[in-house]
Image (cartoon, grey):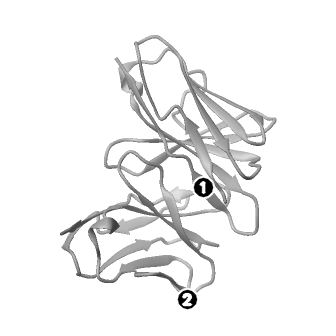
Amino acid sequence: TQLLEQSPQFLSIQEGENLTVYCNSSSVFSSLQWYRQEPGEGPVLLVTVVTGGEVKKLKRLTFQFGDARKDSSLHITAAQPGDTGLYLCAGGLYKLSFGAGTTVTVRA
Amino acid sequence: GAVVSQHPSWVICKSGTSVKIECRSLDFQATTMFWYRQFPKQSLMLMATSNEGSKATYEQGVEKDKFLINHASLTLSTLTVTSAHPEDSSFYICSARLPGFIDEQFFGPGTRLTVL
């Protein structure tokens, strides 16, 4: 089983601030996915990164895949209350391994 | 595209009864679906892999006789919690694997099970 470590576990920030969530592993992944989950709902796929060193942008969200394909980060610029949720990184061939998740709270 | 539905979204049952949860891929065919369990403020825990036309593969520690999985078609997998007990109360989420070069899974909205 490929393990993914996410940090921090919790993040509480004021609206307008920036934040970064990290996802690290000692294993190489062919791809990594980032999901956002709101209470009582299923995870929603935000992005899939495939190429080492890849950077993908989704509005105010920037995703990076490490050169060695062992780590990834999610950066949110000017966070808004609507960004509040549980962010999960996941990776693996066929079966996904999930990080423990980062609970992000953006205060208005 | 890649929409997955679950039914019911929530269910309350008495201890000892069985509950069936359906997972459907609405706009694609999924030979593989996955069933997860999630406890409050925790990540997803994979319970089993559901393969169309064959037996499900269960993760270590998951009782196959308690959590029955049937993948009868390319768009439907069901999870039946048999003889449910209060400790089975949880949030159950399914996902469907979208065939392709990249392994991506798309998740259903989840089913909240409460066993009294």
Quarter the N terminus of chain B occupies? bottom right
| 1 and 2 marks in contact (CB < 8 Å) | no
Q: Nearer the viewer, residue B37 or A71?
A: B37
Q: Is residue B52 above or below residue B82?
A: below
Q: Where residue B115 sits in the image (x, y, percent)?
A: 38, 21
Q: Residue at x 56, y 79 (%)?
A: A69
- Residue that badge 2 annotates: A53
| Mark-to-mark CA distance, 1 and 2 | 25 Å
> Which amino acid type corresponds to the residue marked 1 in the rendered image?
Phe
Other-residue count near label 2 (Cα within 10 Å), few / some / many at <14 / 14–19 / ≥20: some
Instruction: Indicate which disc residue B106 carries.
Output: 1
Q: Residue at x 41, y 18 (%)?
A: B85
Give the letter of the chain under mark 2: A
Q: Where residue B39 sits in the image (x, y, percent)?
A: 36, 41
Q: Where residue B45 sits in the image (x, y, percent)?
A: 47, 45
Q: Is residue B26 left or right of residue A53?
A: right
Mark 1 or mark 2, which is nearer to you?
A: 1
Other-residue count near label 1 (Cα within 10 Å), few / some / many at <14 / 14–19 / ≥20: many
Q: Is residue A76 left or right of residue B27?
A: left
Q: Where residue B37 sits in the image (x, y, percent)?
A: 47, 40
Q: Is residue A3 left or right of residue B71?
A: left
